[in-house]
Every structure is written in structure tokens, then in C-alpha cells.
Image: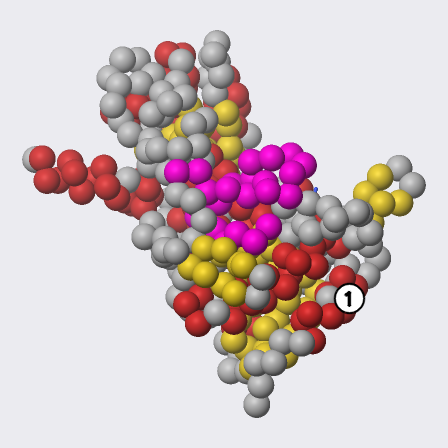
Amino acid sequence: MKKKVVIVTTGGTIAMVKKGEGVVPFEKGNVLISEIPELSKIQNADIEVFEFSNIPSPHMSPKHMWLLSKKIDEILNREDVIGVVVTHGTDTLEETSYLLDLTLRSDKPVVCTAAMRNIGELGTDGPRNVYSSVLTVLAPQSYGMGVMVCLNDEIHAAREVTKTYTSNVATFDSPGYGPLGIVDEDTVIFFRRSLTRERIFVNQIEEKIALIKTFTGDDGSLLRSAADMGYKGIVLEGFGRGNVPPLVADAVEEVVSKGIPVVITSRCFKGRVYPVYAYKGGGADLRKKGAIMSEHPIGQKAKIKLMVVMGKTSDIEDIRGYFEKNIIRRAIKNE
Ligand code: ASP
């Protein structure tokens, strides 16, 4: 029996058309898939389409992401399925793909894709991106690679990739890492594997996690408000190595003392968050006050990871263990 690649559609520009005032979801979100003749020429697999949702990706909530993860696990459990392609909006693709990367239990390939140009727009990129993603699923090296994101002929690791351009089709990049590989015409070529991939198997996630960006002159009131509003965990995007203004440091200490984890990331998207500075608000000072250093700098990635980790534990020191692996390893070595 021929194996199947299941295309799970969720919505996004790839399933949108221009109508009246602007671009909106097309009533039949997965119509695009049936209009890619190249898919029927693929010899070694059949294509099946499953419509999960038809929403713009800014409407994607933690609950949607989690239900999608469970649905994909169910599909991957089928013996006839070799892998899954997920179509999604580009705006939050980096979050959904990372949640899938952390939580999916199967090693079968999952490739997420999208389009920057809607159906009918000149030079629309959706059909090619879907085709390249199916080829990527079928590439033997994709097994066990973790969840990937494939657009514009590049393949990226879900943990590393981020949307960098509001409008250009070459929007996805993995700053500091580069792509895992490329799709050149009909050939998938991998250059490397991601050595930073982690998997955290959970039975639930914590949806109520806030992401706050700090700014010059920040007095910590937004952080305190998030805690007062009932957020169970907070990711705080600081500066550079993971530093914040002095008054924010007081707020961090207060929030952590209430048992709410505060994970520090950086508005720099390359490099590592690390407790270097001991001045008030510096990373070392924040860590002394109980904050967790995320190491990976991108705030929206840390937010997804905190949602997953807090599906397992709400103990701050346990949570720290998931974020500060290298920092803790080094501290133990230096003891
Ligand atoms: N706003 C759209 C979305 O994320 C953008 C896109 O798909 O490219 O749904």
C-alpha cells in the first residue's frame, strides 16, 4: 500500500483571497491543495487533506495549538501515514511549529508551511511551498529531524526559525543558526541537524502565560499587573544578555516571591541570555532575585516553552531546570 502524506490545513494567507476591503479567509480553505498538479505526480505517496481550521494565524490560541498537536499525534500514529505537512499563517507559525516540536511524540516528519502572498495574487508562493514541504516530508533524512518550517525553498528548525520581514516571501530565517537545508527544484538537500532540539512530553499545557517586552524607563508596573491579572508565568524580554531597568528588578523579585516564574529573554534575537551583569537589573542580579534565564533569546519561543513546561510543573526550581541547562551544568562544574 502506498504511504500517505497528510496535509493538515489551519488557515493563514495561504488560504485567503482579496475581497472588498482586504484579504480574508477563503470559504474553502483547502481548495489550493487540489490545485497543485505537481502533487498528483508524486509517485511514492498519496496526499490526503484534513482541514483542522480556517483561521488567520493571529487568531491561533494556545488551546488551538495544543489541540492541533494532539490531532497530529493521532494522524502520525496511523501506519499508512509517513508524515504531515501543516499549512498555517506566517504571523504565528514560529510559535505553533515550536509547540509541535516540543510536544509531538512521533519521530515521523512534520513540516509546517505558509504563504506570504494570497491565492490569486501575482507570484503567489503557497503552491510551491506546499509542494516543497511534501518533498521534505518524503526525504529519508527528515525522519527524526524534529518539526521543520519550509518556505521559499529553505528548510528551518522550528526551535530556531523566526519571521523577520513583514511582507517579503523570504521572511523566515534562523538568526545565528541558518537553515537546515534547501529544496532545489525537486531535490531536498540537508546541510545539518539541529543539536538544540528538546522534547517535553506533557498531557496538558498552561495557557495563561504572558510575554512582556521591557523598555527604557520601564518601572515594572506592566510586570506587576500581569501577575495581578492572574498570569501563571511571565516571559520578560529584556535587553542584551538579559538585563532590565532597576525598578523592573524590584518587580521581578516581588512577582517571583508570589510563586510566579519570570523567564528572562532578550530583544536581541541572536546569542545567549546569560547572567553576566551584577548591577541592579543585570542578569546576575535578576537570577539572584529568582528569575530564570531562558538561554535562547527569542521571547515568543520562551513563551511557548513555558506553556509546555508549566503543563508539567509549577515549581520555579523545576522550571529553571528546563531553561538553564547549560548555566546549571556550568555552576555545578565550578562548585
Ligand atoms: N496574517 C496572515 C496570517 O498569519 C499572514 C500570513 O499568513 O502570511 O494568518
Placement of the C terminus among the 4 image quadrants: top left
Q: Is residue 155 magenta?
A: yes
Quarter containing the N terminus: bottom right
**Image position, residue 78 (x, y; %):** 53, 79
Secondary structure beneath disc 1?
loop
Asked if residue 179 is positioned above or below residue 237 in the image, the reply reads below
Which of the colour schemes (rainbow, by chain, secondary structure, one colour) is used? secondary structure
Q: Main secondary structure of the magenta part?
A: loop
x and y percentages locating residue 240 in the rendered image: 37, 23
Residue closer to the observer: 25 or 320: 25
Tag 1: amino acid: Glu
| Above-or-below relation of 52 to 25 | below
Left or right placement of residue 192 versus residue 229 in this view:
left
Total tally of numbered discs in the picture = 1
- Start and end of the magenta stretch? 152-176
In the rendering, at what x and y percent does residue 113 appear? 60, 55
The residue at 81%/43% (across/down) is: 23
